Amino acid sequence: MASATTAEPVGATPALRRLYFIRFVFAAAWAVLLVASGSDLTVGAKLLLFLYPAFDVAAAVFDARSASTDGPVKGLYANIAISSLAAVGVVVASASGVTDVLRVWGVWAIASGLVQLLVGLARRPMGGQWAMILSGGISVLAGANIIRSAAQQNPSLTILAGYATLGGVFFLVSALRLSRTIRSS
């Protein structure tokens, strides 16, 4: 359990709220574009598949810079490393096909979900983190499901659009909860 001394100060909350809103918009737009691109590994789909974990890296860097020096920063650095590996892994896997892309994505969802869960727990005292904690746990389960779906006869990339959409909704819920925290401070 995190104590109040490990959470970011209230001044970090507006930056985190903005970041969560941006992550929601990005996830929603990304999911729409992925579905529109179809289930084939076209150049556009490959670019989208790279952009999602790359955006996660950028968001974690921003988050780490606006976070306090204790608490979840180590988890954010771990997420930067995990998502960087995922971005490269997706590019490499896309040369082999949808099955390998889904396997890489599933492993990334599990690893980053665990980190998100731990960071959310560390930030719990600042408020608005229950959705992030829940999202981290669901990401672990979704990652396992994505890996399982890769073993099916004709795996589809559209499962990733659902994953991104659900993640985006959790970011929106956290942003709205943080808005309440800011108003009541």
Image: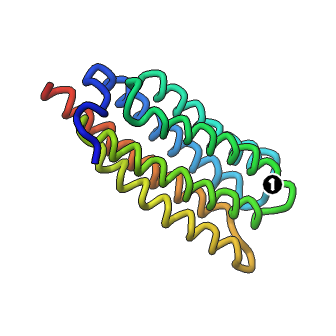
**Vertical relation: 166 (above or below) 172:** below
| Direction from residue 114 to residue 179 in the image, left or right | left
Residue 162 percent coordinates (x, y)? 53, 59
Residue found 49% across the figure and 36% down from its top: 74
The crowd level at tag 1 (other Cα within 10 Å; few <14, some 14-19, many 20+) is many
The front one of 29 and 109 is: 109
Residue 87 percent coordinates (x, y)? 70, 44
The front one of 177 and 108 is: 108
**Vertical relation: 9 (above or below) 22:** above
The front one of 7 and 178 is: 7
Name of the residue lying farthest toward the top: 11
Residue 122 percent coordinates (x, y)? 34, 42
Name of the residue lying farthest toward the right: 95
The residue carrying mark 1 is 94
Residue found 38% across the figure and 49% down from its top: 170
Q: Amino acid at mark 1?
A: Ser
| Direction from residue 184 to residue 3 in the image, left or right | right
| Direction from residue 93 to residue 31 in the image, left or right | left
**Vertical relation: 157 (above or below) 30:** below
Residue 71 lies in what quarter of the image? top left
| Direction from residue 75 to residue 34 in the image, left or right | right
Q: How is the image coloured?
A: rainbow
Residue found 74% across the figure and 49% down from its top: 45
Residue 4 percent coordinates (x, y)? 22, 34
Quarter of the rendering occupied by the C terminus:
top left
**Vertical relation: 24 (above or below) 102:** above
